[in-house]
Image (tube, rainbow, N blue to C red):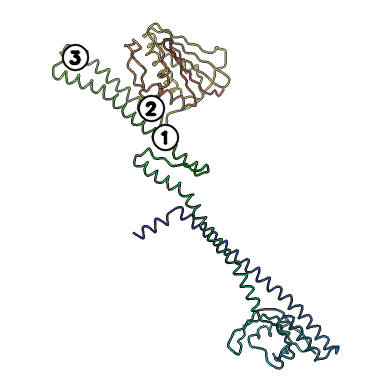
Amino acid sequence: MFKAWVAGKYNSLYLKIFLSFLATCVLFFVGLFLFWNYYFTDLFYKDKVELMEKRAVEVTRLMNSVQDGTISTRELKYTVRILARSINGQVWLVDDKGNIMTGSSDSEGRTIPKQMDAQFIDGLHGRTGYGMVTLTAPDGRSINLFTYHAPYQMGGQPMVFILHFPAGDISEAISAVRVNILVPLLFSLVAVGFILYFISRKLAGPLQQMNRAALELAHGDFTTRVPVTSHDELGQLARSFNFMVEQLEEWEGTRQEFLTNVSHELRSPLTTLRGFIVAMNDKIIPEDKYSHYLGICDQEVQRLQRLVTDLLDLAQIQNGVDVFRLRPVSVADVLEDSLELLKAPIAVNAISLHLILPPPDKEPALVALDPDRFAQIVHNLIYNSLKFTPKGGVLTVALEEEADEVHLYIRDTGMGMTEDELSRIWDRFYKADEARTSRTDVPTGTGLGLTIVKHLVTGMQGTIQARSRVGEGTEFRVTFPRIS
């Protein structure tokens, strides 16, 4: 249980964000502390080194004066003591054996401590330098000394100047500086940690809400929404998520409606067929009436065939699976070929066809179309007009070519539609009020024809509009972009 809780917390996004930013801040503060520590430590030692170098130069001048006979050895000792007081330490003049020849204390004649052998040897080799040396006092205490050594030649014999003073003041100053640097950095790190924690929770909170909402959505709850609390990228993501849920809710409603409509459309002819078959098997229908009722059964079977064909065609168009084979075609030529196949059903319905095409001498307009799908558009629109146009009516097909577009108009003198019907004609399975037409010789539609037309036109980068007035007829306008 505890292991699962730890794993869950470790996989939490806000914890990853928090730890990542916190680690970055820790590294930054550690680097900042090291930098300031080095800077101030070097600053303190730099001042002391410069002071030691100045005093070493003065000792060198004194030794030169001693060799010249300008000053005596007694004056040298006195001056060396004064120099030692200026550095609050001691000045030793050490011969090549390691013995203190002259010093600012009672250490003359003694050998330098072994802890200073490295500085002494370095000086004998003609090099200068400085460093820290730890000595042990008679009472057992450790004494840290800051030393500076410089070489010198006296009478052809090498010797070394060793200047040193207790480093307690420097250590205390450096410790104080370190504390003054470290404490604010620690408080800053704690404050930054709290800020990062709340920022991480604020950043990850909407994502956690979206995760819970997504799980609820996966279980079929389309009422879930994510609260939008900002206008930044997370707010935009929350709005996009809510929009996605609204679309899924709408699609789910459409799916349910689609299934209901399909069930209804399939149930009606199947019920009719079964009723007639059972009636004929039970001899309820006389044998001399079989041909009549078999004709009705055939019509219902054809209706089922049209419905299944339209459903498969619509599914293929919506999925975009190998539907369109576009190529430049002359719209006028394809339109004439399509109407040639429709002249017979138009004439049977006693409807006058008026075809209006651009002048023959005008260069034909080319449009990127799939000729077969364009013919399907024309057939569906004309059959829809035939269904609602009474005998003796007029059907007008007009082609208008503009500089950038080509417009196809299909007008009828049928019963027309109301505004409510006009707004729903593109919906699947929607059928206008068939009671307003007396056409019983036209097969009942599936309610998918105009839906297919809409998807076909859109799939070929075109647009379609419809306008209608009750008692005057309906006009469809199909527009495609012209390529030449």
Quarter location, residue 180: bottom right
Question: Would you call the spot at circle 2 few (<14 residues within 10 Å), some (14-19), or many (20 or more)?
Answer: many
- In the rendered structure, the answer to whether residue 462 lies left or right of residue 214 reads right
Q: Which residue is mark 2?
A: 314
Is 191 situated left or right of 384 in this image? right
Local crowd size for mark 1, using a 10 Å CA cut-off: few (<14), some (14–19), many (≥20): few
- Lateral position of residue 402 relative to residue 57, left or right: left
Amino acid, disc 2: Leu
Helix, strand or loop at mark 1: helix
Q: Do tag 2 and tag 1 residues touch (Cβ < 8 Å)?
A: no
Task: Give the residue type that dot 3 points to.
Answer: Tyr
Residue of label 3: 290
Q: Residue 23's x, y, as percent?
A: 52, 60
Q: Identify residue type, mark 1.
A: Gln
Question: How many callouts does the rendering have?
Answer: 3
Q: Nearer the viewer, residue 36 or 153?
A: 36
Task: Give the label on residue 247, or none.
Answer: 1
Q: Secondary structure at mark 2?
A: helix
As drawn, is 290 to the left or to the right of 112? left
Q: Are marks 3 and 1 in contact (CB under 8 Å)?
A: no
Image coordinates for residue 456, horizontal then vertical, percent: 44, 25
Q: Earlier in the sequence, mark 3 or mark 1?
A: 1
Q: Residue at x 59, y 89 (%)?
A: 139
Q: Quadrant of the C terminus?
A: top right
Q: Residue 190: horizontal and vertical position, in percent?
A: 53, 61
Foreground mark, 2 or 1, reads 1
